[in-house]
């Protein structure tokens, strides 16, 4: 587990949390917390970030795809929801197979 990268997320009210689980707001909307840092530790707001969406071809189970934050400094990506075993995200730039 020590090799796992640690990514922090920003709760809608501003504080940092360690999980990207959906947060239900008082008005009933469910939102994904925003990643604060890329896997290499760059802060997205200062390094620059591209936010996109990728479809996914899971071996089993259901997965509709992932929101992807890509660091403009190093290309590090954070997927939301987190990739599960068997997840196979389809590159949105078409260069990866
Ligand atoms: Zn980075
Ligand atoms: Zn997936």
Image: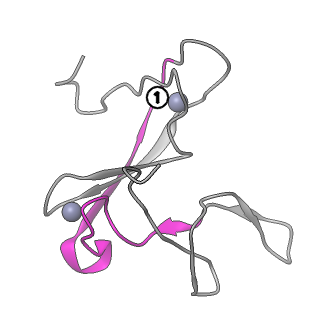
> What is the total number of numbered labels drawn onto the structure image?
1
Q: Residue at x 67, y 18 (%)?
A: 61
| Foreground of the two, 50 or 71 | 71
Mark 1 within 8 Å of ligand 2, using the beta carbon: no
Q: Which residues are magenta?
A: 33-57
> Which image quadrant: the C terminus?
top left
Q: Is residue 4 left or right of residue 66?
A: left
Quarter of the image for residue 6 reads bottom left
| Foreground of the two, 50 or 3 | 3
Residue projecting furthest to the top:
59
Asked whether residue 69 is drawn in magenta, I would say: no
Q: Residue at x 61, y 62 (%)?
A: 19
Residue projecting furthest to the left:
73
Residue 50, x across and y down, in percent: 29, 58
Q: Which residue is mark 1?
A: 55
Quarter of the image for residue 15 reads bottom right
Residue projecting furthest to the front:
2
Residue 37, x across and y down, in percent: 35, 69
Q: Residues within 10 Å of mark 1 (few under 14, many from 20)?
A: some
Q: Is residue 71 above or below residue 63?
A: below
Q: Residue at x 47, y 70 (%)?
A: 8
Local SS, label 1: loop
Q: Is residue 62 left or right of residue 82?
A: right
Residue 26, x across and y down, in percent: 85, 78
Q: Is residue 18 above or below residue 57?
A: below
Q: Residue at x 60, y 29 (%)?
A: 64
Quarter of the image for residue 29 reads bottom right
């Amino acid at each position: 587990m020590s090799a796992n990268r640690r990514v922090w997320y920003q709760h809608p009210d501003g504080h940092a949390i360690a999980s990207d689980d959906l947060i239900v707001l008082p008005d009933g909307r469910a939102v994904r917390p925003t990643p604060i840092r890329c896997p290499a530790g760059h802060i997205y707001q200062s390094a620059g970030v591209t936010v996109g969406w990728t479809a996914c071809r899971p071996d089993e189970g259901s997965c509709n795809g992932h929101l992807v934050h890509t660091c403009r400094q190093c290309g590090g990506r954070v997927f939301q929801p987190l990739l599960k075993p068997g997840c196979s995200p389809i590159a949105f730039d078409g260069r990866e197979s």
